[in-house]
Amino acid sequence: TYVNETLIELLKEKESDIQKDVPAFTVKNIIGRCVDDFHKKPSHQRELIAGLKKSIETNLNLGGVTFNLKVTPVFDTHKNRIATSVEWADISAQLAAELMAIDNGRIKTALDGASTKMMIADNYLKNVYVNKTLVKLLTEKEAEIQQDLKAFTVDNLIGRCVDDFHKKPEHQRKL
C-alpha cells in the first residue's frame, strides 16, 4: 500500500539483481501488488508475518544483493494488527568489508606467526606492515644498521618509505 521514495530508489537500483531470483519483480507496479508475487516461497513469508508480535530483523539475499529487513507489526489503539512495515537496507558492501576484515585478520595472524621475516609496502613504497620476526631481527641489529643508515630506527618502521632503508634508493626503485 505504500513505499517511500528512498526504498523506491534502492529497489530501482537493484531491480535487475532482484529479478535474477524473482523474475516477476518490478518497481514500476509495486504499489497494489501482493507481496507474495515477490517471494520464491510466499508461504514462508506469510507464516512469519502471521505470528509477528514484535519487530524482527532478517537478511534476504536476492540476486547477489544482501538486504537487511526490519519487519514490524503495526497495531491500532485496540491492539489489533492492521499492517506490517518493512525497512530495507542494502548491506552488501558492509558484509563484504566485514568478510575482508576477517580475511585480513587471518592473513595478519599468519604473517605475525611466520618465522620468515616480512615487510609489506604499499604502491607508494610506504611500509604498511612488518611482522614480529623482522622487528625482532631489526631490533637486534639496529645499532649495526645505524652505522650505514644514521636515521634508521625500529620504532617508526610503519609509514616510512622503503627508500629510507637503502644507501642507493634509486637502485631499488629501478628493480
Image (spheres, rainbow, N blue to C red):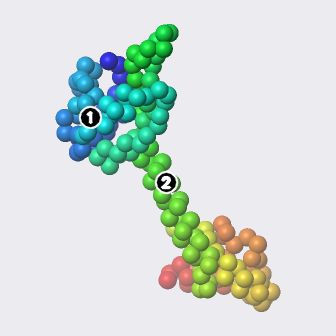
Position of residue 37 in the picture relative to residue 98 (left or right)? left
The answer to whether 65 is drawn above or below residue 10 in the figure is below
Residue at 40% x, 29% y: name it: 51
Percent x, y of residue 114 = 59, 82
Percent x, y of residue 97 = 49, 54
Nearer the N terminus, badge 1 or badge 2?
1
Q: Nearer the viewer, residue 78 or 96?
A: 78
Looking at the rendered image, the disc whose residue lies closer to the viewer, 1 or 2, is 1
Disc 1 crowd, CA 10 A, few/some/many (<14, 14-19, 20+):
few
Q: Nearer the viewer, residue 1 or 49?
A: 49
Q: Which secondary structure lies at badge 2? A: helix
Q: Nearer the viewer, residue 150 or 129?
A: 129
* Kind of residue sitting beneath label 2: Ala
- Badge 1 is on which residue? 42
- Badge 2 is on which residue? 97
Position of residue 109 in the picture relative to residue 26 (left or right)? right
Percent x, y of residue 88 = 41, 33
Q: Nearer the viewer, residue 124 or 75?
A: 75
Q: Which quarter shows the N terminus?
A: top left
Which quadrant of the figure has residue 118? bottom right
Residue at 48% x, 48% y: name it: 94
Q: Which secondary structure lies at badge 1? A: helix
* Kind of residue sitting beneath label 1: Pro
